[in-house]
Amino acid sequence: MTEDRLSKVFAALADPTRRDIVARLSLRDATVGELAEPYDVSVQAVSKHLKVLTDAGLVSQTRDAQRRPCHLEAEVFDLMTKWIERYRVQAEERFRRLDALLAAQDAQETEDQDRHRGAAS
C-alpha cells in the first residue's frame, strides 16, 4: 500500500457516515438502496460516499443478476493495522525505556536517602 493509498483510506474513514457504511458492510453485503435506508439523505448522496470508499479500496461492487451488492474489502484493514501496529510498538518501546529510567532514578534516590540517614545516625 502506498502512502497515497493509505491517505485515501484514512481520509475516507474520517467521515462518520462512511465509517457507519463500513461497519454495516462488515456484517453483510448490501446494495446502495439498502445502505441508504437508515440515513436521512438521498441514495445519490450514499452513492457519493460509496465512490469515496471504492476509490480508497475499501469497498467494491459486483453484479448479481439485477442486484449490484457492495462488498467490504477486508484486506485493506490488514494493511492499515500493520501501519498502526508499527507505531504502536515504537511508542510502547519508548514508554518501557522511560519506565526503566524512572525506576532507576527512584532506586537511586532511595539509596541516597538511606545512605544520608545512615550517615546522620
Image (cartoon, rainbow, N blue to C red):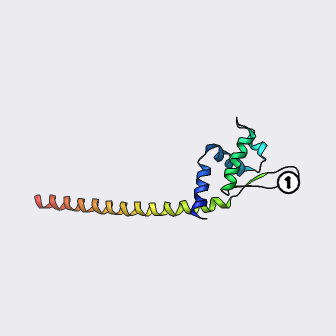
Query: Residue at coordinates 71% horizontally, 43% vertically from top-left?
Result: 46
Q: Residue furthest right?
A: 65
Q: Is residue 121 visible?
A: no
For disc 1, the marked residue is 64
Task: Report the number of discs.
Answer: 1
Looking at the rendered image, the quarter that the N terminus falls into is: bottom right
Q: Is residue 93 visible?
A: yes
Looking at the rendered image, the quarter that the C terminus falls into is: bottom left
Q: Could you tell me residue 16's position as x and y percent? A: 61, 43
Q: Could you tell me residue 61's position as x and y percent? A: 77, 54
Which residue occupies the foreground of this view, 113 or 32?
Answer: 32
> Label 1's element?
loop
Which residue occupies the foreground of this view, 26 or 97?
Answer: 26
Question: Is 52 drawn above or below residue 40 in the view shown?
Answer: below
Q: Could you tell me residue 87's position as x and y percent? A: 49, 61
Dot 1, crowdedness within 10 Å: few (<14), some or many (≥20)? few
